[in-house]
Image (tube, grey):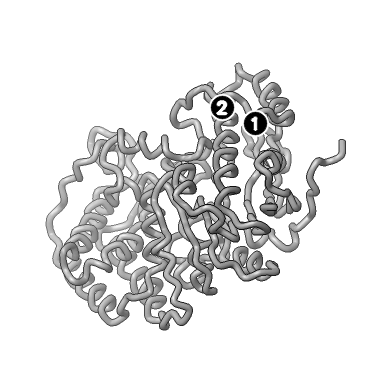
């Protein structure tokens, strides 16, 4: 059957750009190891191919801020929305260009000196989740006692900056600590979840070892980049356009016909819950204190996971989508979660809401580049890219093309088919 939309091979061009590994050594971008996004070079490649100079870009699913930070560096204003409060703060500290390198160096040296004198242990914080820290009544925990004390030593020093002239450095230092949490913990990020490291109980990181990792990161990464800051000649500060919250609602706050470029990557339809993936940062750094907080955050995310039960949703009238849902329903006895069909239907309803709103906010002839990944459930491939392209067309966009960026093997529990990651290119006509 002939493909409805042109799918063109861009693997050679994009394969190294649509993951964030390239950001690991790029100043400012490297401050936090965000693994789900694309690289700053991907954004630059798109901007370079345009036949117009954008005045206002938008990334409604901004993650750790690759799109708005890259735009700021090349002199383009950019709105950025992020529902995860921790990742929202990661973005904002990267945008800020008024740090004083000498002051930061003094703060780091003072904290390093103070960390040498801690003798006592700490009481665990008043948060509902109690499985993070080593206790006698637990069989598993994420932070050993020595590591836990090291973390709270650092947090205590960071919070001493509150209500002082140095308070502006507090979020920056929290991000530095966050960048080390997985490394000093007993777990690693394993796709959709946190999994225990091999021989996790023999984690030999000491309290002082935690201090040294933090101070080393502050000096070798954060301070080194801050000392390179030069006056922002283009005058762009995208922190002014960085908002925390649900993109489905925030898009409506923008002026109609104010956006002339969109570069974004919405959550993939792979049942990955980003609230869960970043739960260490969210709980340890104080963004969540109760399970109710956690549930409310999950409710405000795109329906791409099954960590909460989504309400029943009418399926969009798209033949390809209706067909794949019927195929998946045949495997109901094999479901590892009964909400899978509702998640899939809800995901595309959410994408319809977003695209309908985006059309109103974009200028005529402006472009949108949407990086998405297809999915597989029970041997049925969900071609997310072509379904989103059809939704875009329903909302009056012109679908220029779908660019195949790379092919990945699907998760082993389902099949071994290759899954396409793509960049959908749209024009508002």
Note whether residue 198 is visible.
no
**In the picture, which quadrant includes the N terminus?**
top right
Task: Where is residue 109? Give x, y as percent.
Answer: 23, 76
251 displayed left or right of 103: right
Q: In the drawing, does residue 87 fall left or right of residue 159?
A: right
**Nearer to us in this view, 268 or 127:** 268
Residue, x 59% and y 38% (percent of image)? 352
Relative to 316, say whether 88 is above or below. below
Q: What label does residue 121 carry, if any?
A: none
Question: Neighbour class for label 1 at 10 Å: few (<14), some, many (≥20)?
Answer: many
Residue shown at 80% from the left, 48% from the top: 6
Residue holding disc 1: 377
Find the residue positioned furthest to the right. Answer: 1
Left or right of residue 107, residue 96 in this image: right
**In what element is the residue under mark 1?**
strand
Give the camera-side residue of 181 and 296: 296
Q: Residue at x 68, y 49 (%)?
A: 421
Give the Cα distance between marks 2 and 1.
9 Å
In the rendered image, the vertical position of residue 157 relative to residue 389, given as above or below: below
Q: Give SS at disc 2.
A: helix
Which quadrant holds residue 294?
A: top left
The location of residue 355, given as percent across then percent down, is 59, 44
Q: Which residue is mark 2?
A: 340
Query: Tag 2: Cα neighbours inside 10 Å, few (<14), some, or many (≥20)?
Result: many
Indicate which disc, 2 or 1, sits on the residue closer to the N terminus. 2
Percent x, y of residue 277:
44, 44
């Amino acid at each position: 059957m002939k493909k409805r939309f042109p799918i063109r091979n861009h693997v050679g061009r994009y394969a190294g750009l649509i993951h964030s590994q390239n950001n690991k050594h790029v100043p400012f971008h490297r401050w936090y190891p965000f693994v789900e996004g694309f690289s700053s070079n991907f954004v630059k490649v798109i901007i370079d191919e345009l036949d117009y100079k954008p005045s206002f870009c938008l990334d409604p699913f901004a993650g750790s801020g690759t799109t708005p930070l890259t735009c700021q560096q090349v002199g383009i204003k950019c709105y950025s929305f992020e529902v995860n409060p921790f990742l929202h703060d990661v973005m904002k500290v990267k945008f800020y260009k008024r740090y004083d390198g000498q002051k930061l160096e003094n703060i780091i040296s003072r904290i390093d000196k103070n960390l040498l004198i801690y003798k006592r242990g700490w009481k665990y914080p008043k948060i509902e989740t109690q499985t993070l820290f080593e206790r006698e009544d637990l069989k598993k925990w994420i932070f050993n006692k020595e590591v836990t004390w090291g973390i709270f030593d650092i947090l205590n020093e960071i919070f001493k900056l509150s209500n002082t002239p140095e308070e502006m450095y507090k979020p920056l230092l929290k991000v530095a600590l966050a960048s080390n949490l997985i490394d000093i913990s007993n777990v690693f990020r394993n796709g959709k979840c946190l999994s225990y490291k091999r021989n996790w109980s023999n984690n030999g990181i000491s309290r002082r070892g935690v201090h040294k990792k933090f101070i080393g990161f502050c000096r070798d990464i954060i301070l080194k980049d801050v000392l390179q800051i030069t006056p922002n000649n283009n005058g762009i500060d995208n922190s002014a356009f960085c908002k925390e919250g649900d993109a489905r609602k925030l898009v409506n706050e923008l002026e109609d016909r104010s956006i002339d470029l969109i570069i974004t990557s919405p959550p993939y339809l792979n049942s990955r819950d980003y609230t869960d993936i970043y739960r260490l940062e969210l709980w340890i750094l104080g963004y969540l204190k109760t399970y109710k907080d956690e549930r409310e955050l999950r409710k405000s995310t795109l329906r791409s996971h099954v960590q909460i039960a989504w309400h029943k949703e009418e399926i969009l009238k798209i033949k390809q989508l209706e067909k794949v849902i019927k195929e998946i329903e045949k495997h109901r006895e094999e479901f590892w979660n009964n909400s899978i069909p509702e998640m899939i239907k809800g995901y595309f309803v959410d994408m319809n809401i977003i695209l309908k709103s985006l059309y109103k906010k974009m200028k005529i002839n402006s472009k949108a580049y949407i990086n998405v990944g297809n999915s597989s459930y029970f041997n049925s491939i969900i071609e997310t890219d072509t379904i989103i392209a059809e939704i875009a067309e329903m909302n009056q966009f012109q679908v220029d093309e779908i660019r195949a960026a790379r092919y990945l093997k699907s998760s082993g529990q389902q099949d071994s088919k290759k899954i396409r990651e793509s960049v959908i290119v749209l024009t508002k006509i």
